[in-house]
Structures are given as structure tokens and as C-alpha cells.
Image: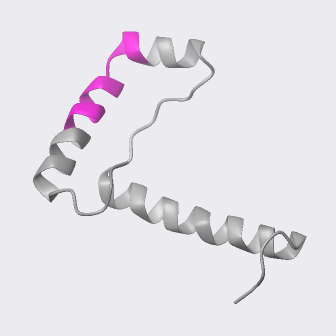
Amino acid sequence: MTRKGVPAEAVNGMAAALEKALARDDVKARLLKLGLYPGYQGPEEFAAQIKKDQGSFKAVLTKLGAIKAK
């Protein structure tokens, strides 16, 4: 995750490095030991997942009365 406006070249470079790191067995093992499940999503997939999750959480929070519907 980065702030808005980071150049695509930088985002893609970080994404490639992350994908490479998550493919390593030692990194996978360490993450699993910490209770994390390693997986990779590219920048576009990750952005889509965040938008989907925001919508889901907004619906739940609205239903619970934690936020007001607009």
C-alpha cells in the first residue's frame, strides 16, 4: 500500500519485489509461523479488493448504526 500519486513505475517495482519475496520458502515459513498466510495480489487486484472490502465494512457499520448512511 502506498499513498496516492506514487508513480506507477515505483508501484510496479515494489510489487515485483514483494512478489519475489513472497515466493521464497523462508519468507513463507516465517510468515506462517507468525500466523500470516502469504499471498500475492498485483496492484490492480489489491486496489479492487480494498474497494470491495470498504463497501462490505461500510454496509456492516451502517447496519450496526456505527455510521450514518448517505
Question: Magenta span covers which residues?
Answer: 16-27
Q: Residue at x 78, y 74 (%)?
A: 67
Residue 56 at x, y percent in the picture: 68, 68
Q: Is residue 10 left or right of residue 49?
A: left
Q: Is residue 66 left or right of residue 40?
A: right
Q: Is residue 62 left or right of residue 46?
A: right
Instruction: State the quadrant of the C terminus.
Output: bottom right
Closest to the observer, 41 or 57: 57
Q: Residue at x 48, y 12 (%)?
A: 29
In the displayed structure, 70 sits above or below 65; it is below
Magenta-span inclusion, residue 22: yes
In the displayed structure, 13 sits above or below 45; it is above
Residue 5 at x, y percent in the picture: 23, 63
Closest to the observer, 47 or 37: 47
Q: Is residue 39 left or right of residue 13?
A: right
In the displayed structure, 12 sits above or below 47; it is above
Magenta span: predominant SS is helix
Q: Residue furthest bottom?
A: 70
Closest to the observer, 1 or 37: 1
